[in-house]
Structure formats: C-alpha cells, structure tokens
Image (cartoon, rainbow, N blue to C red):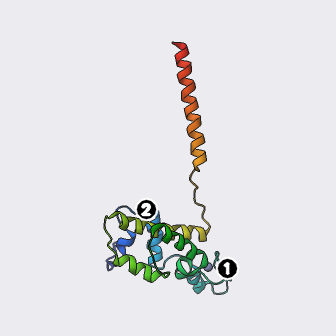
C-alpha cells in the first residue's frame, strides 16, 4: 500500500504554503482551494431535505464562492481589507486566486502580506461561519493594567529593599 499520493502539483500551492504562512490558516485555505470545506452546498448533496441558509445573510445556501466572496458580509470584510492594503481585487474565488497566482509569490514583504491576508480572511470567515470561538487576544487596556501592576510590584520591592539596607 502506497501512503504517499503521487498527484499532480497544483499551480496555486505557493499562495497557500510558503515559509511565513500560518499553518492553521494555510490548512483552511488549502481545504477551501480544493472545495473540501463542509459548506452547505456540499452537505445538501447527502442531506437534501435539510433546510439550510448562509449564517451571515440568511438568503441562500452557503458555498465556497458565496461564503468568501458573494455574501454581503464577506464583501464588506474584503472591502475593508482592500482599503487597508491599498489593493483592488475582484470578488470571486477564481479571479482572486488567479490574480494572486499571477503576482510574484516570493519572499518580498508585500507578496507575503498579500498571501497572509488572503489566508487570514478565509480562515476567520470560516471560523465565524462554523461558530468556532476564536480565543480573543488581550485588549490594550488589559495589557496596560497588567504592566502597571508589575511596575507597582517592582517599585514596592525596590522601596522595601532600600529600607532594609
Ligand atoms: Zn450569505
């Protein structure tokens, strides 16, 4: 039994897998690129009687294309990303992949950022639609409060040490 698949190399592999990629983002993106995510259009094939609708817009079945590019929620996310990156991309899975593939995929910082942003957006949209909680990072206020407590602790240690001497 051969466990190693000898499948053809796909053209888009450098969009997903590169040295600076975030593995969990790359994995979801890799699944999406192969249309392997459990979207409702795929589930409906083996569960045709289930009533399903996109969790974002509640207007139709979700699919890779809908979830990531044609849903009103996703379009708003991409528009914000485009503003932040000062890029202009079309709103279709195929054309974005083609555009990213055409651009240089190397160690140039913008090449890395472009691919990271694509992976991050796909990953977080997928987490949002599947309802998985993303562990929130600490807010600036929480970090500042913790730092202030540590500073106070050090000051009091210095003061108490100076009193002992
Ligand atoms: Zn939708």
Side of 101 relative to 162 (left or right): left
Front-most of 113 and 83?
Answer: 83
Q: Position of residue 34 (x, y in %)?
A: 44, 78
Residue underneath mark 2: 22
Residue visible at 43% across and 63% down? 23
Q: Residue at x 59, y 79 (%)?
A: 71
Determine if the C-beta at disc 1 is less than 8 A from ligand 1.
Answer: yes
The image position of residue 42, as x and y in percent, is: 55, 83
Residue 38 visible? The answer is no
Q: Residue at x 60, y 61 (%)?
A: 133
Quarter of image, res 112: bottom left
Q: Quadrant of residue 87?
A: bottom left
* Residue that label 1 marks: 58
Check the picture and name the quadrant holding the N terminus: bottom left
Q: Position of residue 46 (x, y in %)?
A: 59, 84
Q: CA distance from mark 2 to mark 1?
A: 31 Å
| Mark found first going from the N terminus, 2 or 1 | 2
């Amino acid at each position: 039994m051969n466990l190693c698949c000898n499948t053809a190399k796909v053209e888009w592999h450098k969009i997903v897998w590169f040295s600076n990629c975030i593995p969990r983002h790359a994995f979801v993106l890799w699944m999406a690129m192969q249309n392997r995510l459990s979207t409702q259009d795929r589930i409906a094939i083996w569960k045709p009687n289930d009533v399903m609708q996109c969790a974002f817009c509640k207007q139709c079945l979700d699919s890779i294309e809908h979830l990531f590019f044609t849903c009103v929620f996703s379009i708003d996310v991409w528009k914000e990303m485009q503003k932040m990156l000062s890029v202009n991309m079309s709103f279709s899975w195929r054309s974005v992949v083609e555009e990213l593939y055409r651009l240089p995929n190397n160690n140039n910082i913008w090449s890395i950022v472009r691919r990271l942003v694509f992976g991050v957006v796909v990953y977080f949209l997928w987490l949002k639609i599947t309802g998985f909680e993303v562990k929130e990072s600490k807010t600036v206020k929480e970090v500042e409060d913790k730092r202030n407590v540590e500073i106070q602790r050090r000051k009091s240690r210095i003061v108490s040490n100076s009193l002992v001497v």
